[in-house]
Amino acid sequence: MILLGQILIAFATLSLLAIGGANAVLPEMHRLLVDVHHWMDDATFTQLFALAQAAPGPNILAASVMGWHIAGPAGMMVATLGMLVPAACLAWIMAGLTIRLRGNTWMKPAQFGLVPIAVGLIAASGLIMAQATVTGWAALVIVIAATLFVWRTKYSPLWVLLAGGLVGLVLL
Amino acid sequence: MAESLSQQAAGPGQQAPSPSGVKAGRLPADQPQPAATTKVPGRLELFLGFAKIGALGFGGVGPWARHVIVEERQWLTEREYAEVLGMGQILPGPNVGNAAVMIGRGFHGLPGALLASAGLYIGPLCILIVLAMLYDAYGALPRVAPFMTGVAAAAAGMVIGMALKMGFNLKPPVQLVAVGLLAMGAAAWLRLPLPLIVVILAPLGIWISLRLARKPQP
């Protein structure tokens, strides 16, 4: 019970620090789980994070896998709620503010001022992902082909993921 | 779609060019009749749409969220989605998770926010439970490395492609493009912490955008 409380507090803290998503809190998560609480060693932390990356969904769900590893299903539940609920509450409050302020003439331009940051950071995360995966020409070709496919067509991105996997099987 | 067409049928050729199209850019919460091109999802549809986003979101849910919300189901326009995502980006938590709360609230209040969030996380959580059990049992990832490397490479391209698509569809003024490129460079090359980037660039972006709005655009 004390353990579950500790897990909850640890992940709720991380939740409020996670501006930019999971990758932003990765160092702090590592510090809390490995160095402060000694819930797992370094290698386990890295493997669990990779495990969460392999699954679909927001990368923040790495918290769920970590919680499972620390304390089983109850740990997963507590970690997931701790990670999601505080941030979701802030988003709820923010949505309420925008609805209240929507009549103001300055609201739309102010909101639009944040858009380039979102798009820029998305592009950056794509570039960082590409850097991590491109080890040879085949992977580079996949990255470029997928970029063009998603940019220039309206087809479901599923095709490009599937094709990337198949090309990977043959060439990587 | 047929309904919204018949509602507009009164004035053919009067595509109601709402000046600069900006006014239409808002969450359709208290807008009963559908805005220009968007559709209001029912509660079940909201849940299922976000469930699709979550379950298919290999390599991150961002491109899927945009694909489903803007292109496939047309719940929001490109600009509306970008604005919600921009807010989701500066708040803590996953940007699409925050967008789910805000979009869900916009359409259906608290039930909408809960349904959209539940949809987004339910599929991935089930898959993660299976993966966590496999990991506990075998102590390592299943060896599907070449396939997963290919998927990861494609996912990287998918994310870059989405950013390009949004950037070109939105056509922001050049000053804001510069802010976006600064954000990208700071994160991708300088590897600065994201909270720092947001704290510095968010006020800059808002200030530029407000200044541009005050002067009439040429």
Image (cartoon, rainbow, N blue to C red):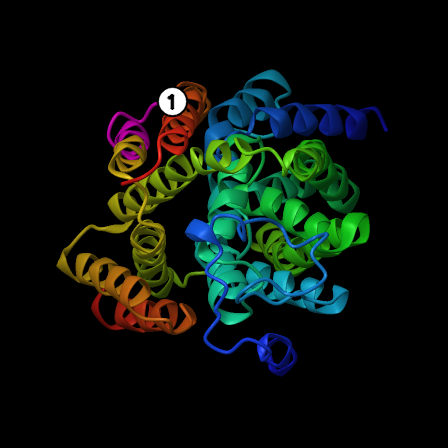
For this rendering, which residue is in front, B143 or B91?
B91
Q: Residue furthest right?
A: A1
Q: Residue at x 41, y 29 (%)?
A: B214
For this rendering, which residue is in front, B35 or A6?
B35
Compared with B78, A41 (above or below) is: above
Q: Quadrant of residue A89?
A: top right
Q: Position of residue A118 (x, y in %)?
A: 42, 39
Tell me which amino acid carries mark 1.
Leu
For this rendering, which residue is in front, B11 or B212?
B11
Q: Residue at x 61, y 22 (%)?
A: A38
SS of the residue at dot 1?
helix
Q: Quadrant of the C terminus of chain B?
A: top left
Q: Residues within 10 Å of mark 1 (few under 14, many from 20)?
A: some
Q: Residue at x 32, y 31 (%)?
A: B183
Q: Quadrant of residue B181?
A: top left
A138 on left or right of B188:
left
Q: Quadrant of residue B192?
A: top left
Helix, strand or loop for the magenta stretch, by majority: helix
Q: Residue at x 42, y 61 (%)?
A: B143
Q: Is residue B94 magenta?
A: no
A145 on left or right of A103:
left
Q: Which residue is mark 1?
A: B204
Compared with B10, A55 (above or below) is: above
Which residues, given as a range, are shown in magenta?
A: B182-192
For this rendering, which residue is in front, B63 or B166?
B166
Count of numbered labels shown in the rendering: 1
Q: Quadrant of the N terminus of chain B?
A: bottom right
Compared with B78, A17 (above or below) is: above
Q: Position of residue A8 (x, y in %)?
A: 75, 29
Q: Position of residue A47 (x, y in %)?
A: 48, 42
